[in-house]
């Protein structure tokens, strides 16, 4: 009888003829190949799945969302940008890291039958204006110059922080533009234009000044693809709602307001983003397919040759969301032992600065100071600090209750007469804070008065 060996694969025991049997060598090769490739693949499937989707090495997320159109018949462009604004906020990007530019205030337009509300659907299910919209640039502030200055950081020193794009080399930046455009340009306020060359040069300045790590550029307008044709900066993924020569079309009309309410591309992009959560595994590759031509009626274009990663392996939340990264420490953290130095207090202006780690003495001093102040201000029972003339301030810094007047305030001399004794007492108390009998000294000062 020919000796055989056996192997167990997926619960089945299979007899394997010896290798010296020439008639069974081919069977052995096939069988061992099956074991070598199938079993390890099954074991490492979870590891491969984790490897497939990779998050970038960015440290922050920012968004620049711009509506370039004004006038009532362009209501849909405001709804477009507010829809994206609502999505990025829901996914974790705070208002402090969103620059929102809206050229017209549709929420307060007298033609709006829903005051202080903007809807992106005739069913009025979602008010994208909401209660907490923070518009950074509105009306005539939305210009080509201001937009380029925001991107490049060339803003006046007096510009508020909320109007600045404070990105760095670790920031992922989402830029979304919507409005009326043509071959190689996008109109601002129906009075000026930004060209694809202007956009390309501004993004290159951002790269040279280390103002972004990766960028997702989205534009929803007619002939949108022409706006990213001139890009030459690295790590930029660009998406346009229409190719050159195509119009970007609106989705539907709201009879209540009589105008189109949202564009097709943004409508289906929002529909996709509504199913995204901060922890979901949706990818940019899926986002590129949110609006096929039979839905958009235009061809959505994109450019990925400048982007270093495969969009199918990039989380959508790398640009539309923001998650705090928490790293677990494997090694124990050893805290230093408490200091044996006595706690000291330093009087700087009107601030008490503690030094050292002894909390109890500091708390004791603070309690004594509070007790001292409460004792000196016992007779000040009104909400106002005091309402009396300086002549009625007694020598010990207190005020006669009989001499209080309603709705009057201390003159500067009156304040000085009240607080100078308290100030001297505090200085005297702090000067003796190093002594061993500090508590007794403070108590004696407290009861003795100035």
Image (cartoon, helix red, strand yellow):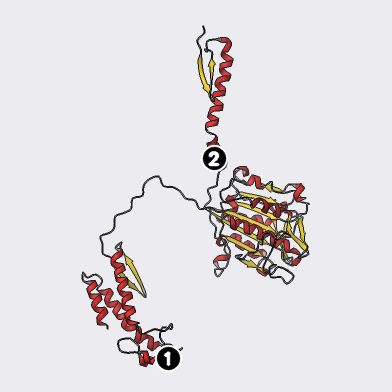
- Closest to the observer, 394 or 172: 394
Is 370 or 172 nearer to us in this picture? 370
The 10 Å Cα crowd at callout 2, few under 14, some 14 to 19, many 20 or more, is few
Residue 124 on image: x %, y % = 70, 61
Q: Which SS class for mark 2?
A: helix
For residue 429, which quarter of the picture?
bottom left
- Dividing the picture into quarters, in which one does residue 171 lie? bottom right
Q: Earlier in the sequence, mark 1 or mark 2?
A: 2
Image spot of residue 244 (x, y percent):
76, 51
Name the residue beneath numbered marker 1. 405
Q: Is residue 112 shown left or right of residue 284? A: right
Above/below status of 268 relative to 194: above
Residue extending farthest to the left is 436
**Is 194 drawn above or below residue 394 in the view shown?**
above
Numbered mark located on residue 50 in the image: 2
Rate crowding at label 1 as few (under 14), some (14 to 19) or many (20 or more) other CA atoms within 10 Å: few
Q: Secondary structure at mark 1?
A: loop
Residue at (64% x, 52% y) in the render = 273
Contact flag, marks 1 and 2 (Cβ < 8 Å)? no
Residue 31 locus on image (x, y percent): 56, 20
Nearer to us in this view, 276 or 159 = 276
Q: Position of residue 235 (x, y in %)?
A: 60, 48
């Amino acid at each position: 009888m020919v000796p055989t060996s056996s192997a167990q694969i997926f619960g089945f025991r299979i007899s394997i003829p010896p290798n010296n049997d020439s008639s069974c060598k081919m069977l052995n090769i096939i069988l061992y190949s099956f074991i070598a490739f199938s079993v390890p693949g099954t074991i490492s499937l979870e590891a491969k799945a984790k490897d497939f989707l990779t998050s970038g090495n960015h440290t922050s997320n920012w968004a620049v969302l711009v509506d370039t159109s004004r006038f009532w018949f362009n209501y849909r462009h405001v709804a477009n940008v507010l829809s994206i604004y609502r999505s990025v906020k829901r996914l974790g990007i705070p208002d402090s890291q969103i620059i929102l530019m809206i050229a017209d205030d549709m929420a307060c337009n007298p033609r709006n039958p829903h005051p202080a509300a903007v809807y992106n659907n005739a069913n009025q299910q979602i008010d994208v204006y909401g209660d907490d919209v923070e518009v950074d640039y509105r009306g005539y502030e939305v210009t080509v110059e201001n937009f380029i200055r925001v991107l490049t950081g060339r803003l006046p020193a007096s510009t508020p922080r909320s109007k600045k794009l404070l990105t760095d080399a670790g920031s992922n930046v989402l830029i979304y533009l919507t409005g009326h455009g043509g071959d190689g340009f996008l109109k601002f306020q129906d009075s000026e234009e930004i060209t694809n060359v202007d956009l390309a040069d501004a993004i290159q300045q951002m790269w040279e000044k280390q103002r972004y790590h990766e960028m997702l550029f989205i534009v929803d307008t007619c002939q949108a693809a022409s706006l990213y044709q001139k890009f030459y900066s690295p790590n930029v993924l660009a998406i346009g709602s229409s190719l050159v020569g195509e119009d970007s079309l609106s989705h539907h009309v709201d009879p209540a307001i009589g105008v189109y309410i949202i564009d097709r591309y943004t409508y289906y992009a929002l529909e996709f983003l509504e199913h995204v959560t901060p922890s979901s595994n949706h990818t940019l590759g899926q986002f590129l397919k949110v609006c096929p031509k039979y839905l958009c009626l235009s061809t959505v274009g994109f450019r990925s040759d400048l982007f270093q990663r495969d969009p199918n392996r990039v989380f959508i939340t790398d640009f539309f969301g923001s998650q705090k990264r928490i790293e677990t420490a494997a090694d124990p953290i050893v805290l230093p032992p408490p200091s044996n130095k006595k706690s000291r207090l330093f009087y700087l202006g009107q601030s008490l600065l503690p030094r050292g780690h002894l909390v109890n003495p500091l708390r004791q001093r603070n309690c004594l100071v509070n007790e001292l102040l409460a004792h000196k201000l016992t007779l000040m029972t009104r909400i106002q600090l005091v309402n009396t003339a300086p002549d009625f301030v007694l020598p010990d810094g207190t005020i006669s209750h009989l001499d209080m007047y309603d709705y009057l305030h201390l003159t500067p001399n009156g304040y000085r007469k009240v607080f100078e004794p308290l100030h001297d007492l505090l200085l005297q108390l702090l000067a003796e804070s190093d002594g061993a009998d500090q508590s007794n000294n403070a108590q004696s000062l407290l009861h003795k008065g100035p």
